Each structure stands twice: as structure tokens, then as C-alpha cells.
Amino acid sequence: MKTSVDVHTYLEQQRLKVETALQSVFSPDWIIPDKLREAMNYSLLAGGKRLRPILALAAAEAVAGQAEASDRALHFACAVEMIHTYSLVHDDLPAMDNDDYRRGRLTNHKVYGDAMAILAGDGLLTHAFHVVSEAAKSGVPAERVLAVVRELSQYAGLQGMVGGQVLDMLGEQGTTSLEQLEAIHLHKTGDLIAFSLRSGGHAAEADDRQLEALGRFGHYVGLAFQIQDDILDLTGTEDKLGKPVKSDERQQKVTYPYLLGLDESRSRVSALTDKAAATLLEAGFVKPDRLLEIAKYLLDRDH
Amino acid sequence: MKTSVDVHTYLEQQRLKVETALQSVFSPDWIIPDKLREAMNYSLLAGGKRLRPILALAAAEAVAGQAEASDRALHFACAVEMIHTYSLVHDDLPAMDNDDYRRGRLTNHKVYGDAMAILAGDGLLTHAFHVVSEAAKSGVPAERVLAVVRELSQYAGLQGMVGGQVLDMLGEQGTTSLEQLEAIHLHKTGDLIAFSLRSGGHAAEADDRQLEALGRFGHYVGLAFQIQDDILDLTGTEDKLGKPVKSDERQQKVTYPYLLGLDESRSRVSALTDKAAATLLEAGFVKPDRLLEIAKYLLDRDH
């Protein structure tokens, strides 16, 4: 049980570090229209697990072998969360998923209107690249920062998250096969998680082999996380999840349990988590423990 | 008359160079959903003056003193046009300006639907940063490329173009003073033009004094350009403009002629163009002629 307590404490500590950093991504020196600042913060500071930024910090630690190394990844960690947030704001719009609530609060456009939600999303996306560029000030070499810019635009862009959103949207209009479902998750969710880990690696100046392993670990964990989400939607309780259960069924969403059944879905989560662990252990990290614990935590969670 | 012929030939040559480069910003090696690629290209390859990218190329030439220098600015030039295009696609959405036509063609969302137009805009914005990062391959030093990333996220972001869009949106809901109108144009239009020029300067490794002058030149020219647009909307012919005239009046838009009258608006364009020229001449560029010619061309145009 010791490991389990440890990982919870670790996740909470890192989450607080991320929350604090996110509170100052919009410099007070910048002249930003008040309403825009408010709308962006409404969604950016709405809480949540902050899983993606924490993975960035933990990846830096795994490469460097010391906890302090994660500080150099903090800019990248914030940028990932900004990208994740903008994608949710745009995804919730009436033209897209048309959601009124997220995590029990009104969605951005329900509070600020559709036009402001579009612009707040555009602003978060654009400013994420600014936050990445600021990492140069924390001592990350310019070449590494530039590599992270390149990868963020790739993993969050046309053949990454945005491409995945398009596949998802087109998929909703017809039947979806397991192969299509996997392609959607790989890009819509997996790519940004893979980027999180690689960005942490860059902050700690990982070599190519380590970067490749971090990206692969991210894709395995991302897919396991997604399948686990689908399972919890069917088997969890509203109390623990903080949202209505069986919403996928009601919305007739194609999910892993729908295509494979619950048992097969569960064994996929387990197999993916094993693969993720093996990937890390083979690549010779100085201190992979935290990442392995987080992967195990994600598998075992009930919310 | 010689100068006038020259600048037209120059603009046409550079426009063709930009068109060709824009045709390959989405690498054929990238796996991008077909519909997304099509939607982005629909708006990106819709023609137009390509003024912003041409200014980037001309700025590199002004700093380096030779035409070949502009090749190193080509990535930045393409990125500017991608940002400009995404902003038009989002701006035309029903939730924003709700425009059905742009330059005589259906707007993006009228062809591909609102959801795809939002994602095409997000994709263009994200990929612009990728195109910037590619400049490192054309021999621009990593520090300069990173400076351009930082500036693009600033000039196109919260205190730049996106901030200007928000001011414009909020302004439409009340009366607008000359001061407010100027702040809107400074950010909504001027900042991206200033960025274009600075990015070209970075490509040619301009010093701080030159960069500052290029940005200032861009702001003067951008404002003059905007006032001239307002004037042409009132005095031009539909034939020359390729769009209905007096649309500002019909839409009850607050414009420079509305606030200042035609004569005062005209003398402002003239004064701003003089200031732009003086700024360049003071900063000691090797070859500022092209930029000066372009500024003059913008002032004299009738469409």
C-alpha cells in the first residue's frame, strides 16, 4: 500500500504546482481585454486532475533522475494544459458537441457567448506557444525549446489532436470500426499525452531513444486511459465520477465496451499498461518509478 | 512612372512565390484527414493580394540588401498568411460576423459546415507555428526562429490580433470613439502586419533598432491601409473593389470617414505614409526602397 499512498501524495503535490503556475500564464504586464482574460481563466482554472502536465513533470524527473528537473518542464506542462483546455472549449460549442455543462459547471460559451468562447479558445491555443517559448528563460536550450514548438504543432495539430477531432466528427456520421475508434483516440487524446511526456523529456535533455520511449509510453497510457473512461461510464457510480453514468449509451456513442464487451475491454487496459511499463523499463531511464506508478494508478482508478 | 511599374512587377513576382510556397505548407507526407486538408486549402489558396507575406519578404531584403535574402523569410511569410486566413475563417462564422461570402466565394463554413470551419481554423493556427519552426532548415539560427515563435504568439495573440478581435466585438455593442477605433485597428490588423515585417527582419538577422523600425513601419502602414479601406468603401466602385461599396454605411459600422470625414481621413493616410517612410529612412537600412514603394502603392491604390 505504500506505493499507492506515495503516488497520491505525489500527484497532489504536482497538481498544486501546476495550479499555481497556471495562475500566472497570462502576465499581469500584458494588456489583455478583461473579458477575454476572464473567459480564458474560467476554463483554464476549472480544476481537474491535470494529468497531462503532471506527466510532463514526471517525464523530466524520469530522465534526469532528480525531482528538481521537473521545474524546467513547468512551462511545457502549462502549455499542454492550455492546449487541452482550448480543445474542450471549442469542442463544447453548439456547432460541435453542444454541451451545456462540463465538470458540473456551465461550459464557456454558456457563460460568455459563442463568439467569446471561440476567441478564448484561439487565445489559449496561440498563447500556449508563447508559454513554450518562455522555457528558454528557465535554462532549456533554444534547440530543445524549438523542438518542443515543432512537436506541439504536430501532436496538437493536423495529424494529431485537430486531425483526431475531425476523424471523430466524421465517424459520428457513420458506423465506426474498432480500427477507426483506435485511430480517433490515438490522435484525439493519445497524441497530446505523448507530447506531454516528450516535452518533459526535452526539458531534461533526453536522447532520441528516451524520447521515442516516452512517446510510446504516452500512447499506451493514453489509450488505456480512454478505454478505462469508457468502462467507468458503464460501471462507475455518479457519486464517484461526479457526472451522470451511462451517458455514452444514451448518446449512442461507439465505445470499447460497445465493440468488445466489458471483459475484453478490461484486459486491453491491463495489456496496454503492461506494454507501457515494459517500454519504459527497456529504455534505460534513471528513475522511471513515478511514471510507472502513475500508469498503475490510472489503471486502478474508479473515477 | 517607372517606380510604379516596378513595384507592380515586384508585387506580382513575390505574390507568385508566396502562392507556390503556400501550396506545400501541408506536407504530402503528413496523414491529414482529406476533408480537413480540403477545407484549409479552400480558404488558404483563395487568392488575394498576399500583402502580409510580401512585406515579410521585402523586410528581409531591406535588411540584407539583396533579393535572395527574402528566401530565408519564406517560411515566416507563409505562417503569417495562415494566421491571417484562420482569423478570417473564424471571423466569418455565424457566431461571429456571420458572413456568407468572402471575395465573391462562399465562406468556409457555408461550404464545409460550422464544425469543420472551427477545426480548419484551429488547424491553420496550430500549423502556422510548425511552418515557422521549419525556418531552422533554411538556415535561420534557432534563437531567431524562437524569437519569431515568441513574437507570433504575441502579435497574433492576447494583446495582439485575438485581443483586437475581442475589442472589436465589444465595441460593436456600444458607441466607439476615435481612440477605441484606433486601438481596435492597431491590434486587429496592425499587429499582424508589424509582425510580418519583424519576422522578415529576423530572417535577415536584423539588429534591435532595425526590428523596432520595421514594427513601427508596419503599424503606420497597417493603420493607413485600414483607413484607405474605409475610404474606398465609400468612394470606390464595385467594379474595381470586387465587392459591394458602402457596406460599412449599411452595416452602421464606425469608420474613420464616419468619425472624421473624408478629407481628414485622406490626410491621415498621407501623414501615416510619410511617418512610415521617415521611420525606415532613419533606421539605416541597406535597401529600404521596396518597402517604401509598397507603402506608396498602398496609399495610391483604388482597390
Image (cartoon, coloured by chain):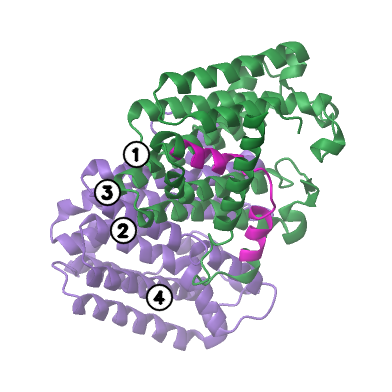
Chain colours: A green, B purple
Q: Is residue A58 magenta?
A: yes
What label does residue B142 carry, if any? 3
- Return the residue at label 2: B199
Identify the chain of the residue marked 1, using the numbered disc in the image: A
Q: Amino acid at mark 3?
A: Ala
Callouts 2 and 4 in the same chain: yes
| Local secondary structure at mark 4 | helix
Q: Earlier in the sequence, mark 3 or mark 2?
A: 3
Whether label 3 touches label 2, CB < 8 Å: no
Residue at image x 40%, y 53%? Answer: A135
- Return the residue at label 1: A205
| Local secondary structure at mark 1 | loop
| Local secondary structure at mark 3 | helix
Residue B265 image position (x, y, % from top left): 46, 83
The quarter of the picture where residue B35 lies is top right
Callouts 1 and 2 in the same chain: no
Residue A13 image position (x, y, % from top left): 60, 47
